[in-house]
Image: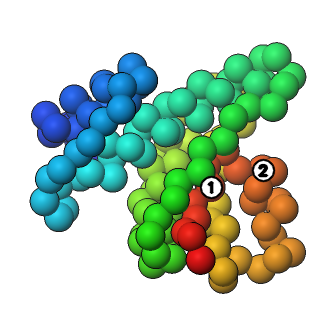
Amino acid sequence: GIRKLFLHQSQAIESAMNGIHTVVCTGTGSGKSLCFLLPVLAKAFISLRQSQNCLKLGSAAILLFPTKALAQDQYSKLSLLLKSLQENDNSRTAPLRAGVIDGDTPHSQRDEIASECQIILTNPD
């Protein structure tokens, strides 16, 4: 799991959470994904809680990646984060859900993913 964020991660996350457009330019394997995944998770969780309290629909995040392979790789990382969050969450809030909609997603599953998931990963194809 995540033990401690690097400085560039904490600065990027703080900026994103404060609504500041942010660019992160670091090397491969430096943890850039967490710079956008953690703010997306935080905002999605806040939206989900508010929607459950007010009986209205929450918002969703669409994460667009240049390739199906990268979207699938990021989905794997996101799934691990969500699993960890659910194991450590003592509230009665419904769990956040993520899904992938791409050319390989069966048409029969697309509507469910689009309506049930708070975070959707996709690519332009």
Q: Residue at x 31, y 25 (%)?
A: 14
Residue 78 horizontal/vertical position (percent): 47, 55
Residue 47 horizontal/vertical position (percent): 65, 27
Residue 35 horizontal/vertical position (percent): 31, 42
108 on left or right of 27:
right
Task: Between residue 13 and residue 84, name the one nearer to us.
Answer: 13
Label 2: how many Cα within 10 Å (few below 14, some 14–19, many 20+): some
Amino acid at circle 2: Glu
Q: Quadrant of residue 73?
A: bottom left
Residue 1 horizontal/vertical position (percent): 31, 49
Q: Which mark is residue 35?
A: none
Height in image: 58 above or below 116?
above
Q: Nearer the viewer, mark 2 or mark 1?
A: 1
Height in image: 27 above or below 91?
below
Amino acid at circle 1: Ile
Task: State the count of labels.
Answer: 2
Question: Circles 2 and 1: CB distance less than 8 Å?
Answer: no
Q: Residue at x 81, y 51 (%)?
A: 115
- Per the image, the residue denoted by label 2 is 116
Task: Between residue 107 and residue 38, name the one nearer to us.
Answer: 107
Disc 2 on helix, strand or loop? helix
Is residue 64 visible in the rendered structure shown here? yes
Task: Between residue 122 and residue 49, name the one nearer to us.
Answer: 122
Q: What is the C-alpha distance between the residues marked 2 and 1?
A: 10 Å
Q: Which mark is residue 120?
A: 1
Q: Residue at x 58, y 65 (%)?
A: 122
Is residue 1 visible in the rendered structure shown here? no
